[in-house]
Image (tube, rainbow, N blue to C red):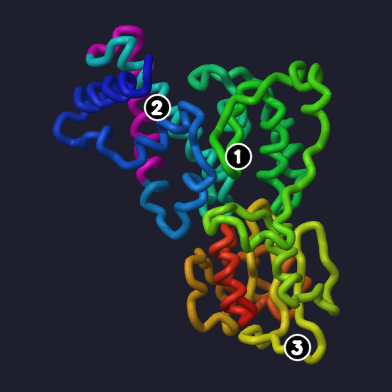
Amino acid sequence: MRFEERLEVLQQCLGQIYPGVISDVRLSPLMPLLERCEGGTLRTSDLLDWQGDFCPVAWLNLLQSTLRAMDDWCERLGGDRGLLDLEHYQALQYFAALTANLLSYVALYDSDFIDYPLGSEDINRLAAKDIIQPTRLIGHKEFSLLYDAAPVDGGRHEALLDWLSGRRYFKAVSESGDITAQGSRLSEQADPEKRLPKPPATVGDTWQLRAESDKLSSEDVIGVLQQHGLVPHAAYRETKYLKPLGFKPGDSSGPVACGVLVVEKTKTANLWLLTADVAEPISGLSRVDYPATSPSAERYGRNSNLQKIAELAYAPVSKFKIKTVAELRSVLTYLGRG
């Protein structure tokens, strides 16, 4: 059954059980996202552009909880569900699973924005051919071992994505394109070219020739910042997760009065700055401000690796996500190096 047909059945189902209460879900602007999630055409922008707006997540959670409650209600009634025939009941189950998948994608690709409690059932469903009755590929114990073995900041969801990437039916989100079903491991082994690691794409000296909307990796961002005069910070070592940057002796630090800024080496670069050094918004960049904290605080509330950077460890800090060439230009303008 096509998505539009399933959606029509879902609306009929909701209308039968909640007449006059449930609005027409077909008109929701989030339905196209669910359709892309089903059809394999989600884009990374679909998952990253929600920052600061919790309404979509609230709507999805409400829809999912409503469908789960209806599913449970139908199950308790037994085989003869009265208001619902088998087609309606299956549409209920399908959209409950599809909504959970979309929430799981958002959590995996933008964990700074949504704290969605992922579990082994979510991972199994993302890797399943049949999302209503997913095969149990990973159990609770294996999930816990995989999840807990990775660093809390910047590693746990990457570890889950690495595991999922080897599953035949997982639809991986790519930076530039769509979600496409992964080929089986056997087909990859049969083609030696597919086993060769691809060299990382770098911006290099040609970055200014690229389109404003082109995506950049954290390595690209670090490389361009260093081309424009920033240097590895003398007092802080680079780690697997952070690249502390500073300024050459005698060189102006511009608005960065504390003398240090940090690039978090996530898939899409996060730039950490002292809030006091960013009096004005940086044009076009999403911003998340973190209040002051202390070593005795119950929850640190920011990337734990920042505890090693004295200037940013406990003072109010701001995080900016640099996704595109245009956003990197804005950062260079803020630094006075555009």
Mark 1 lies on residue? 174
Label 2, secondary structure: give it: helix
Q: Main secondary structure of the magenta part?
A: helix
Q: Amino acid at mark 3?
A: Asp
Question: Alpha-carbon neighbours of circle 2 within 10 Å: few (<14), some, or many (≥20)?
Answer: many
Kindly identify the residue that appears in the image at 54 percent across and 50 percent down: 115
Residue of label 2: 95
**Image quadrant containing the N terminus:** top left
The image quarter containing residue 163 is top right
* 138 falls in the magenta region: no
Mark 1 and mark 2 lie on one chain; the one further toward the N terminus is 2
Q: Name which residue type carries label 1.
A: Ser
In this orientation, which residue lies closer to the viewer: 298 or 332? 332
Nearer to the camera, 226 or 266? 226
| Mark closer to the observer (3, 1) | 3
> Magenta part of the protein: which range?
59-82
Q: Which amino acid type corresponds to the residue marked 2 in the rendered image?
A: Phe
**Towards the viewer: 290 or 207:** 207
Query: Mark number for residue 251?
Result: 3
Query: Can residue 304 be seen in this snapshot?
Result: no
Question: x%, y% of residue 55?
Answer: 36, 51
Foreground pick, 314 / 330: 330
Residue 52: quadrant of the picture: bottom left
Magenta highlight on residue 69:
yes
Q: Quadrant of the C terminus?
A: bottom right
* CB contact under 8 Å: marks 3 and 2: no
Residue at the far left: name it.
Answer: 20
* Inter-mark Cα distance, 3 to 1: 39 Å
Q: Separation of disc 3 and disc 2 at Cα?
A: 57 Å
Camera-near label (3 vs 2) is 3
Residue 41: image location, x then y, percent? 49, 33
